Structures are given as structure tokens and as C-alpha cells.
Image: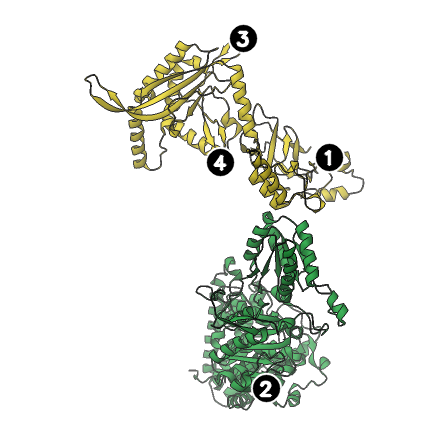
Amino acid sequence: MIPTDKTSPLSLYRTMLVIRMVEERLAKSHQRGLIHGACHTYVGEEAIATAVCAHLHEADAVFSTHRGHGHALAKGMEPRQLIAELYGRETGCSRGRGGSMHLFAPEIGMMGTSGIVGPCILQATGAGYSSLIMKTGNVGVAFFGDGAANNGAFHEGLNMASIWKLPVLFVCENNQFATEVPFSSVAGNPNVAARGAAYGITSIEVDGNDVLAVEAVAREAVKRARNGEGPTLIECKTYRTRAHAEGMGDFTYRTREDVEQWKTRCPIARLKKHLLNQKLATDAELSAIEGEVAALTEDAHEFAEKSAYPTAESATTHVYSAPRSGPPRDVPASNANTRELTFMKATLEALTEEMARNPKIFVMGEGIGVRGGNFATTSGLFAIHGPERLRDTPICERGFVGLAGGAAMTGTRPVVDFMFADFVLDSVGEIINQIAKMQYMSSGRLKMPVLMRGCIGIGHNAATHHSGSYYSMYAHFPGLRVVVPSSPRDAKGLLKTALTCDNPVLFLEHRELMTVKGPVPEEEYFIDFGTAAIVREGSDITVVALALMVHKTLAACETLAKEGINVELIDPRTVAPLDVDTIIQSVAKTGRLLIVDEDFAHCGISAEIAAQLADRGFDELDAPIRRLNGKPSPTPYSPTLEAAVVPDAAAIADAIRNLCAE
Amino acid sequence: MPIEIQLPRLGWSMEEGKFLAWLKNDGDFIKEGEPLFTLESDKAAQEVESIDSGILSIPATGPKSGDVIKVGHVLGYLLHDGESAPFSNQPAPKTKEPIEAQQPGKKSIHSSAPILLPEKRRTETPASPRARRAAKEHHIDLSELTPSGKGGRIRECDVIAAASAVASTGFKKIPLTSSRRTIAARLMHSRQTTVPVTITGRCDATQLVELRKQLKADGESSANTIVPTINDILVKLTGAALRQHPLLTGVWAEEHILVPDAIHIGIAVDADDTLLVPVIRNADTSTLTQIAAQSQRLIAAARTGKLAAEDMQGACFTLSNLGTLGVEAFTPVINPPESAILGIGAIVREAVPLDDGRFTARDRLTLSLTFDHRVIDGAPAARFLQTLRQLIEQPVLGLV
């Protein structure tokens, strides 16, 4: 019988066999056309996943690569779930949404394989951060290849894990080829373990084909992590003995002899020899294990082949988490007691309330700790909650956004404070490829409550790296919520919703509004996403505007009222979801639509609103839909140039007059 | 040779029709007998079936929905495999043709084929979508308006101004639909070419009502049968009466009177602001169930605008029932070339004196017969009415 202890030699032997036999089955199935996409096998590298995962609990979180079947199986995924996923079936671990490179089983701490090289390093760091916040003692593990060691994520992730002593294992499976490029040809220092010293991380190099050696190293690393002694970098020298991906040629970049030579170092054969030599097992015992695993693999294949494909109707479910149940949350503006607050104070109030209520919220950013934020976004909170929940970060946007993604995946609620939204662009891959897609890829089993906030907007001569509006770009992608408030009242209510919803949110605050004052209700309230505000009622023309443009349009409205033009002003408040219904209802009244938007016209939110109105409100239109946008150029510095690229009240008034004459 | 698809003539008076929509796509293979497009004639919209097979080829200048097109105009073509369309303004349908056409030395069919010139579209004043909607609601003709928008676009306010100007005269204009024009023309034609006389007579409809109750009860117990209406029974009884008095079905033909062999009876149907008269075939020889089935189909088709032209042709007599709206007697107008029309009044329960001076309650029905005195004299008309009254009073006699 196989001992229940996963670290026992017989258990290690069996786990490696499961990986090997499942991979060989998949290779056959790939040839037979049962696998619809890519299939990267782990043959030759089985010892690493097996030995590391042997020391992990179910609650420890594993983040993997494109070559992740072995990690999933070693973490405890049933072969049935894995094979069914590769066959594209409903019974697969990701319900057919992912395939080989998106294997999810968060119930057992398998937090996903990935088609992108690098993010797993940051996400495992995030899992370590969750462990720190929630005091669970859980460990985050990143498996990655030598190729990822040359990626910025490696640098940023290892540095953050080191400075905060996070319980993380960075397991580099150095199989010597980054896809098909020899690592030695793309690494100035091909010794990955040696790089750990640069970050002050304990680093060990080990023979990755010796399961007992890896087991011993992993045992120490996991112990150190659980004891609060920080992360470990483990470089496992290994080799994959099948092609990069099934169906690909293998001998343009390496030789048959090399591959054959490495096959003689097969980790499974090595352990078998050791077990027999040391009389730890008999031939009969090992044969029995082999027979049992072969039957298990065959059963999994049959199960997968018989399983149904998911229905087409379910193709877009789980893009967002299930909406909050219950009636819309808001307070009646008319009878609420209010006081005058600035935009900044209003959002600070929201964050203060929610951080007091929810201990899983933490904030990351540059200068948001003791300093209290560049825009006082966290003023006073450090004194209450301390450095772990108000975390000053290195300047590595991609790194801490990736970390935030991993933290959200493992149960905490990160708030990333970017200061300026221009900086977010360095982390767009983490936002779009990871955070936005994670709920869907995991078929709704992972929640991604990541709040990302930063300033947008032109008007303070900060030039092009501190003035952009980027909401249209984020609104384009399924999976994200994009909030662009224009008043203190809206900002607080929307931030409260952002801090309590399960979807990732971009919360973009216009720099010129930070000190604008307005009435904010005394009592607690929330403003649901996807509900536009009718800022001003009117009958002649509908103007849709966001953020600062709401205020500039209001100024124009006063002039126009004297001329007899009565403007109805709508503020969508959230760009995604977009409340088109309210705009259509307004246009049904006025017959005219002008969209005033500081962002660029082409492919922007103004184009989206115009298209939806032309489609759904065609018969309501008494004139063409018109847009007034910022000029399509980077934001210039000089005041005269800056003023020329953004609509002002006079330009808005002219546009309204012109459209009313159409 | 490409087969031309022409706008068909759907009825004797049809000169043009309103093209509604293709039911097939360009490049589809069409089998003979498959519905090809929908067309609105004087009275109704109907599906037109293809009379040939081939690959449908629609020119870019082909008919658009709502175009009014003369009968015989070519709408498109049916092509054989490999054949190209006789117009050059769009790519050939999915056939091997483009490859063949590129072969050197082979003369393109395009150059020798006649090129269809696009029909000039009426130049319209541009109007905003909202103005178009308002014009429809207020029955305003956009072409009569002076546009106030930039570039000469009619705006909603122009329509509203016109509508309120019309309102101040105390009238609003309702534009004539083509079916309203047709109805008006036909009624005027009737008045000018016949010598109508109307006679009325009352009859006891108690047994008719009983019979209908009985049929309804039978129908409910057997679930899926069609239950004949009072009107269906009256069609059947009228058929029987007409068989005994064929002169009532005669047509004045200047030199002689034509009496048709078959007795087809039109029934007037009030449908969506228009009046349609679909025709029940062989009212005298059909069973009551057959009549009920015919009328059910025809009335449903009339109400949904799907009556075919032939559904409204060939009647020799018409029934018009205003009884359900409470009218007791009226003077129906003859539908030429027919010579007589029967108006059915309301069935009213009345006290009827018995011989002993007491009263009893009976269902009473008034019949109003209008006939063309050129064809029929008063006495034969009255005798027809008498026969029909007797049949209504003892309906079972007329149903066997």
C-alpha cells in the first residue's frame, strides 16, 4: 500500500507515474485530434512538481506556466478533470473555458496554468501577501521556466517577496530552453540561483531530475516560509524530453543525442532503481502501482471522451461575478442630510469606512503609507492600520499589480493606488491578461476584487505622462468595471460599491476635481455601477459628459439658458458598464445628442455611445449625433498648447448651438 | 439564358405593385415553387412563388422594400450553374464563372448582355429620423414642408409646425392608402353602372341559433373540429337558395346575362382599416365543415394581410354582415360584376304574439337584399329572399 504521507518515496513514485502516464496519454490524444489546442507536456520534469507539492497543503496556492499539467496533478487534480479540460469538455477543471494553458482548481489551491510567461511569479507573491494579511500560514508557490527568469516579473516579484519576507517559493524549472531558444544564449548569467543574491533571497540549485533531492530542498523552503523567514528561490536543473509542444519538430535547436542522453536520467527510472536497491519496495509492489496508475489514466481518458461539450449558450457566463442581489442601493438626494466635502475627502471617507469594516482590504502604492498618498487618498489610515495594510511599494507598477491579482485570487481585497493613471500602463498585461480574465477562466470560481485607482485628466500643466484619460481602453475589455466620477457625492458612493463588489475596478479620478467641493450625505450609501446621473434636466439637447467635462458643460449650460437653449446633461458615471438606457430616454425627449469627452474621439467611449444611440435610438434623433473630444495628440506642457487640446466651456457652448441648429 | 424574374400581375386591375422584400438571398439556389419575394397589390400583401429554378441573382439596382414597380418590370434573374447575370454592377454569383471569364480567348458574356440601367430614385428632401416618425404620426406629407435644418434637412419642429397649422384649419389630413383608393373606385363604379334596389325581410332565426348552439356543443366535445359560425351557416343556406334562383348570380354583359356554373360567395371582412372580400368556393355543394374551414383560413389571412389575389376573385354573390355590430337593416352596395348582395342584420330576441293572444320569445333576423334591377326584377328577388327565409327558419333542410 502507498503511504498517505505524500513525501514518502512510494508516494513520490506514484505521483510521478501519474504525471508521466497522463502526459503520454495526452500525446496520443493530441495525435488523434482529441485535443483542440496546444499541449505542452511535462515529460522528464515530473520530479519537480511532485517533490514540491508533496509539502503543500490544499490551501497553499500554486501558480503555474504553460507547461502545467504536472503541477495540477501533483497539487491533487484528478486526471479525469485534467484530460476532460484538454478535450474541451464540460467536466474539465475549467469547464472547457481554458484548455491546457488555463487549468484552474482553486478548491485545491491550483490557481491556474498560464499562457503568459512571468505573471505566476507575481501572483504567487500576492498569495504570500494574502497569507501575511490573513495570518493563515499558507504558502504561495510559483513554478516557472528559465525563460521567465529573464522577464521583469522575476525581478519585481523576487524583490517584493524579499523586502516583505513573504512566504513564497520561487521554483525555477530550468529545462535549458525558453520555448526553443537555448537559455545559455539569452542569459548573461545562466545560473538562475545566483541571481537570488541580488534580492537578498535564500537561493538553492538542485538536480531537478532527482526527486529526493528536490524533496529535501522543498521541505526546508516550505518550513522557512511557514516560519515567517521569507521566500526561497529554487533552481531545478532539468530537461524536457518531448518537443516544446506536441506536434512540433524538436531537432532544429537540439540534437537527438542530447535528448537520448537526458532520457537516461529519467527521474522515474532513477527513483525506481533507488527503491529496489535500497529494498524500500519490491518489483511486485512497483508493478502494482504501475498497473493501478495505468488503469486510472485509461479511466480518465474514457471519462473525458464520454463527457459532453459545454453548451454554446454558456460561452459568456462568468465574465463578471454574479451581480449583488437585492434592490439598487442609493440614498434619495432630496431628503438626505449632507455636508460639503472635497472630492478627496469623500473618497477617503469611503476607504476609511470600508477598511474599518473589512480587514482583508489593503492598499499598495508609492507614498500611500506614512505620507498618506500624493492626493491624500490614504491620509490618516497608516496610523490606524499599519504598514501591512498601507503598503508603500517599490516603483514597479507591473509587479504590484500582478501581486494584487494573486492576492485577490487568494482571498484578500487589494487597493492599488497609482497616483496617476498614466503609470498603470506599465501593468496593462497583468490587468487585461490576468485580472480581467481570471473570473472567466476559472469558470467563476475565483473572484477578483481588485480596485485600481489613479488620477486622469488634463489641466495642471503636467504634460503627457501625468494627464492621460484611459477609460475607453479599459472599457473595451470584458471583465473590467471602469468608474469615472464627477462629484464628491458620486465618488464616495461609487468607491463604496467598488470596495464591496467582486469584480476588478478601474477607479479613475480627474486631477482637476480633487479639491472640488460638493454635498455628501451624512448617512452611509452606495451608488450602483451602470446607473447614469441626470445632472441637469432640459428639453432641447442631451449632452453626455464625464468627470471634468460635466463641470465645463454645466458652465456652458448657464450661458445657453439665457439664449433659450435648455440642455439636459447626463453623466454616465461608469464607462463600463455603460447606462445607455438613460441616454436613450433623454434623447427621446430632446432629439439631439452631443457627447463631450476629454478623451480621444476615435475608438473611444464617445464613439461607443454614438454607435449605440444610432442603433437603438435612431428614430429618436432629430439631428446627427455629434462628438466634441480632446485633440488626438499627446498632452503638451505649455499652457497655451495644453488649453488647445481639451474642450472648454466656450467650445462646448458652440457645439451645442451648432447641433441645435442642425 | 438567364431567366428574368418579373413583377407579376396578381389581379385583373393590377398595374403596379409595392415590392416588400426578397425572401431569398442573392446567390441562393431557388427551386420552382419556393416563395421568392413578397409583393403588395391593391388590397393585400402576398408571397410570390418562383416559377422556375435557378441561382438567384439580384442586381445592385434591384428593387428596394417599398418601391412601387410596374407589372412586368425585371426584378432579378435566375441563373443556371456557370451562367453569369446580364448586369455588370456587382460580382457574379458563386459559380465557376469568374474563372472561366478569365480564360484567354473566351469572350465575356458581360459585354454582349444588356445592361440594366438603375431606375432613378425619387429625390426626397432629407428629413431626420425623428421628423419622419412625427410625419407618420401626424399624417404630414414631408415633401410639402419647408426644411429649417442646416443643409435643408426637415426637422421634427417643421413637422409639428405643419401639423399645428393643419390643426388650426379644423381638419387633419389622412393620406389615402392604395386599398382605400381601390375601395372608393370600385364603389363609385358600382353606383354608376348598376341600378340598385334594396328590399328587406324578417325571418325567425330561433332554429338557426339553436343549430349553432348544437354545433358548438358538438365541437367542444370533440376538441379539434372547427365550429361553424352563424355566418358559415348563412353562406351554406344562401348557396342553396341561389341554386334555386340562379338569376341572382347573373352578370350583366350588355348583349346577354351570364349565369355562372359554380356558386362562389364573397364575404366582406373588416380588416385593419380596409375592407376585403375573400371568396368561399362552391357554397352550394361544399359541406358546412368545408365552408367553415375555408372561411376560417380566409378571415385569418385577411386580418394578417396575407390574402392572395385569387382568394378574392370569382364570386357571383356577396354576404355582408353588420349584425354583429348591432345593425338591423341596411342598404349594401353591389360588388360588380356581381348583381346582388345580401346584408345580414343583428339577431334580436323579440316577443312574438301567438294565435291565442299570448306572447313567446323568438330570435328574429332581418335580411337586406340589394340587387341590380337591370338583371333582376323585384318579384324574383323577393322569391329568392322568401326561399332563404324558409331555409333560415328550418336550417336543417338547407344543410342536407
The chain coloured yellow in the image: B
- Report how far apart the C-alphas of labels 2 and 1 lie in the structure: 80 Å
- The residue type indicated by label 4 comes to Thr
- The residue type indicated by label 1 comes to Leu
**Label 4: which secondary element:** loop
**Label 1: which secondary element:** loop
- Report how far apart the C-alphas of labels 3 and 1 lie in the structure: 48 Å
Query: Mark 3 and mark 2 in contact (Cβ < 8 Å)?
Result: no
Q: Colour of chain A?
A: green
Labels 3 and 1: the sequence-earlier one: 1
Q: Which residue is mark 1?
A: B117
Could you tell me which chain the residue with mark 2 belongs to? A
Q: Are marks 2 and 3 on the same chain?
A: no
**Label 3: which secondary element:** loop
**Residue at position x 69%, y 53% from top?**
A658
- Report how far apart the C-alphas of labels 3 and 4 lie in the structure: 41 Å
Labels 1 and 4: the sequence-earlier one: 1
- Report how far apart the C-alphas of labels 1 and 4 lie in the structure: 36 Å
Query: Mark 4 and mark 1 in contact (Cβ < 8 Å)?
Result: no
Could you tell me which chain the residue with mark 1 belongs to? B
- The residue type indicated by label 3 comes to Glu
Q: Residue B356, how many percent across, how many down?
A: 18, 17
Look at discs 2 and 3 and give the one toward the viewer: 2
Query: Relative to residue B68, is residue A564 depicted above or below?
Result: below
Q: What is the number of the mark on residue B255?
A: 3
**Label 2: which secondary element:** loop
Q: Which residue is mark 2?
A: A370
- Report how far apart the C-alphas of labels 2 and 3 lie in the structure: 114 Å
- Number of numbered discs on residues: 4
Q: Is residue A354 visible?
A: yes
